[in-house]
Structure formats: C-alpha cells, structure tokens
Image (tube, rainbow, N blue to C red):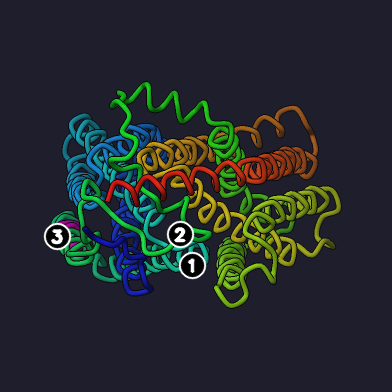
Amino acid sequence: MKTLEMFGWLSIARLGFIQACMGAIVVVTTSTLNRIMVVELALPALLPGFLVGFHYVVQMVRPLMGYGADQGRRCTPWMMGGMMVLAIGGLLASVSTVLMGIDLIYGIALSIVAFLCIGLGVSACGTSLLVLMSKRVPEVRRAPAATAVWMMMIVGFAVTAITVGQILDPYSPKRLIEISAYLSAAVVLITGLCLWGLEGYSSNETLIYEQLDEYEVEFISNTATVTSQKQNFKQVLASVWSEPQAKAFTVFVFLSMLAYSSQDLILEPFAGVLFGLAPGETTQLSGLHHTAVLCGMLAVAFAGMERVAGRLGSIQSWMVGGCLVSGIAMLGLCVSGIVGPPWPLKANVFLLGVANGSFSIAAIATMMRLATQDGEKRAGTRMGLWGASQAIAFGLGGLLGTGASDLAHYFVNSQGLAYACVFGFEAVMFVMSAGCAVWVGRYDKQDVSVRRQSTGRIAKELSHEY
C-alpha cells in the first residue's frame, strides 16, 4: 500500500531540465540547420520550411502516444524513449544536412526520416511530461510550475543556440556532426538522470490518498474499484472527443495557438515596410515581444502562487483576459498599419507579448487540470489530443500568416491596409479563443456538484476495498 506524493519544486525542476533538453535538440534543427541549408548550401528556404512543417504534421500522433502512456500507466518509459528518438533524429538531421552538400536527393530523403524521428520524439516525451505534471503537481502550484518548466525550455533554446553558434565557428561539416553527436548524447544522459526515481511507483499498484479536499477529483486514480473493459485507441479517442469540455478546450487551443503563431513571420516585415526599421531594429522588436511574453508568464505564475491564489484573479480569468487583450493589441496593430509611424509600435508589441504569455501559461495550467479531472486513466489521451491541436495550429500558423499577407497584398494596393487586414483576422481569432475559454469555464461550474458526489463515492469504495 503506497501513498501518492505530489511533486515539490525539485521534482518540477527536473522536469524543466527535460523540457530544456527537448528545446536544445529542436532549436538546432530549426535554426542552425536552417541557416546552413540556406546560406552555406544555397538551397531554397522552402526546404527547411517544409521539414519544420513536416515535424509538426507528425505530431498528430500525440493522442496515440498519450493513449499508450495511459495503457502502461507510467510516463517515464515514454519520456525516456521519446528523448532517445528525438536525439537520434537531431543527429540524423545534421548528417542529412551534410549529405545534401554531396548528394541532394539522398540528403533530403534522410532529412525526412530525421524530422519524422524529431516529431515522434517530441510527441512521446512532451505529451508524457505534461501528463506526469498533471498527475503529480497540485493545482495551486500548476501555473508557477508551468512557467518554470517553459522558461527552462526557453533557456535551453538560448544556451544551446549561443553555445553551438560559438563552437561551430568556423563551420565545417565534420564539426557540425560532432557537435550534434555530443549534444544528442548529453540530452539523453541528462534526461536519464532527471527521470531516475522521479515517478517513483507503478500506477498499476494500489494507491491510498491521505486527504480528500479540493484536489481529490484530480488525483484519484480509477483503480480496482470500478474497472471498465479496455477500449482500443479509436474508442478512447472518440470517448474523449465526446466530452463537451475536452472538445471546447481543443477548439480553444487550436484557435489561440493559430492566432499566436500567425503573427510570428509577418511582424518583422511589417515593422520594416511600414515603420522603416532596419533589420537589426526589427530583430530587437521581436526580442521585445519575447521578453514581454516572459513577463506575462511570470505574472500568471505569481497570480497562481499559493499565498496569492485567487487574489489577483483565477487562472480562468487570466486565460480569457489574455486572449481578449491579445485581440485588442492586434487591433492596435491594425490601426498602426493605417496610421503609420506616429503609432507607438513598441508599446503595442509589448502589450501583445504580455497578453500572449499570460493566456498561454494559464492555458497550460488549465490543460493539466482538465487532463486528470475525471481520473487518470485517459489523461494521456486528452493531453495528446490538445498537443496535436497545438501542433497543427503552429504548423498552419506560419503558412496562414504569410499566405494571408501575400493574398492581402495582391488584392489591396496599400501595404498598410493589407497588413491591417491580416492583423484584424488574427484579432478575430483571439476574440473567438476568449469565447471558447469562457465555454470551458462554464462546464466547470456545471460539473462541480457531480464531481463532489463522484469523489465521495470513489473514496467510500476505496475505504471498503482496502
């Protein structure tokens, strides 16, 4: 008989290191290799764009990965296995890039295999990491925990990009493969050390809970009391999709992430064309946006801390408010496209970043809560469904943003008005996302009494059984 232990900050930090390891592999494949293909090998920019988009398409398997973790009842094997596949994919991506300089066809073929591995690895490791957090991080700690883990991923991006950039100069194919090999070995080793003894038990073993309070529904496992017949993946996915709240949250994730990612590739060109900013200045503007995103994340983390929880608004209100303010900021960019340089562009972009960061972390905290709201047996499938929705949105975001921009420029003579049309469309998506967030919250109010009755019944059955 074992007692379920919630994660403390040390355990959360270990998960953060794993997230940073994923970021370290991904940033090399999406930035460093991208640059080498376009500059050193003089290949069309469409090629790395296709490969990055392909790895997002592969992540549609996330629900299947989550279902597999649900069946095994443990997240550790999926996280470790996913990181190993991701590391192999990262190494193959570097090898394929070098091979492109020798034989383009074979190089592209190998790169497709590499990015397939990257998509599978991210899906398995990333989905299971979120599932484990949803099961073992208390609700009052979820927003700060999500912020800490995602900030460590960003640190992984930055540290790896800077370090690899310094070591890789001067560039040589041999040096690229060596760096990639060492990086892949390092992330697998670090992940193994971080996972050692972290999960601590097999979910197939019986668990007794020391207390049943506001967390009881989220952390009660559906164990031997009411065992249902095992369902296959299609049945489980259909069952999860039939849950109104899960469906509402899936739509929210898709719309909000689509709007979030659509502006990434057009913000800098917009600032250069309409405001006359130099390339360095537009890069600084992008950096300002990312800094503001971190500020928004930290604000939600502070609002979600135990001592101030509820005083600065609920996670639900931050999620809705973040989407609405993002929409307002996008409307500001619409106006700036028409008004031009007199508009305070930097302040507008900073507001957009803060709003983006706040709703994204609030959404992750909500995701962890909803995944285990009705027990843990389908937590992985739910998390996988939402992860796939996010991946599809990110994959479409860049295409939609740039495509809509080109289309608007084709039909509208004024460049400012063309950009305003695109930003206006994104503002509408953010407002629709806020509506979906409200929709998600309404199901919480409807289900609270049902969940309390269910908790009492399950606790009573557990006490009789053991």
| Near-viewer residue (251 or 209) | 209
Name the mark nearer the viewer: 3 or 2.
Answer: 2
Please tell me whether the stretch drawn in magenta is mainly helix, strand or loop: helix
Quickly name the residue at label 2. Answer: 212
Amino acid type of the residue tagged 1 in the rendering: Arg
* Residue 79 shown in magenta: no
Could you tell me which residue is drawn at 58 percent across and 37 percent down?
245
Quickly name the residue at label 1. Answer: 141
> For the N terminus, which image quadrant?
bottom left
Tell me the quarter of the picture where residue 259 sits.
top right
User: Is 91 positioned to the left or the right of 252 in the image?
Assistant: left
Across and down, in percent, residue 344 comes to 79, 65
Quickly name the residue at label 3. Answer: 185
Across and down, in percent, residue 105 comes to 22, 29
Q: Which residues are magenta?
A: 178-187
As drawn, 38 above or below 142: above
Outermost residue on the front side: it is 464
| Near-viewer residue (207 or 98) | 207
Residue 87 seen from this side: no
Lower position in the chain sequence, tag 3 or tag 2 = 3
Q: Residues within 10 Å of mark 2 (few under 14, many from 20)?
A: few
User: Is 283 positioned to the left or the right of 17 in the image?
Assistant: right
* Residue 182 shown in magenta: yes
Lower position in the chain sequence, tag 2 or tag 1 = 1
